[in-house]
Amino acid sequence: MAAPRTQLVVSEQGEQSVFAFGGPLDARGSGLVWNRAIAAARRARGRGIVIDLAHVSLLDTSGAAFVLALERASGAEARIEGGEAQFQPLLARMRAAVPSPSRPAPPANVGLGDLLGAVVREITDAIAFAGEVAVALVMLPRNRRVLRREDLLRYADQAGVRSLPLVILLGFLIGLILAFQSAVPMRRFGADLYVPNLVAIILFRELGPLIAAVILAGRTGSAFAAEIGTMRVNEEVDALTTMGLDPVTMLVLPRLLAVMVAMPVMSLVLITAGLIGMGTVMASFGFPAVLVSNQVVSAVQFADLLQGLIKALCFGAVVAAIGCRQGLRTGVGPRAVGLAATGAVVGGIVATVVLDGLFAVLIFRLGV
């Protein structure tokens, strides 16, 4: 004997559409009338629909889900007629279990107060992180077993040694471009002899540590954020805390100390490569190497070199700290690590430029 077939009759009752079902409204029966019923419910959108279950012999969870789909397609809660005592509890449970589609929230108006609040929270978090790093440094003699020499060497190699080819290339190109762009206008006044003085002072005081910091932020700061962020997503940082190990001492301090050691060396290498690039341009203009070197020695003092090294040290510490902080703040989800790496690069570059401006004001006030 063949199983009864699900039937659907759609009629109009005033301004409402009536969906009268017959037979079993289970998974198979719902599938037979699904497309026709959903299309009719969409045509009646906004007018309200009536679902007549008086002649339905069976209603399971698939049928109840089908009824809710009709409601969503019509844009309003349907009025159920017939079979209330038998089917209404199941429909109520399904309606409670299936979340109703939420409307997108209107875009929030971000005012000046919200922006200032976000800036204050960011500064507060940065100060708190700096305090944690300071405490970890003070407690380092007690926790020195956590700080391994192998980690320091590995991070120094990652931050400094492996970045030397890029540092040399960029330093040479920057020195070459600075010398060429400076020599062309200065030649009009017969002052192209002083191009080595100008380029040397710029490299030692500003561009040497600044370009090295930008390279560090793009190459190493993002790597630190991605490494620690992956550990955060995998709950490895929480595991360290559970075992009684300080994550700042174990994850942040080795990277911070390694970068502070490598950064002055990177700055010196970039300055040397820039001077070689400048010397190449001056040699093409007919200036001997001895004359160029004498001009550099006469223009640059030890205070200029010391100023550049101090800047490089501070820039490296800031870039490494921001990369580690972004890694520790990584959220949950597939995009979290990428957002942390991006934040480390952007934050490192912006902080380096701001810190360089503060150094410029301080040096000007001190008259150095």
Image (cartoon, rainbow, N blue to C red):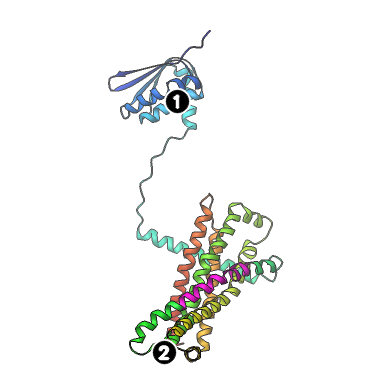
Q: Is residue 253 visible?
A: no
Magenta: main secondary structure equals: helix
Q: Which residues are magenta?
A: 155-175
Q: Nearest to the eye among marks 2 and 1: give it.
A: 2
Q: Is residue 328 above or below residue 301?
A: above
Q: Residue at point 64% right, 65% down?
A: 249
Residue 193 is labelled as 2
**Residue 302: image x %, image y %?**
53, 88
Instruction: Identify the residue under disc 1.
Output: 66
Q: Is residue 173 magenta?
A: yes
**What amino acid is found at the position of numbered circle 2 in the picture?**
Leu
Q: From the viewer's perspective, is 153 left or right of 182? A: right
Where is residue 26 drawn, in percent x and y? 50, 20
Looking at numbered disc 1 in the image, what kind of residue is underneath it? Phe
- What secondary structure is marked by label 1? helix
Q: Could you tell me how far apart the alpha carbons at marks 2 and 1 are, in whole angstroms?
A: 86 Å
Mark with earlier residue (2, 1): 1
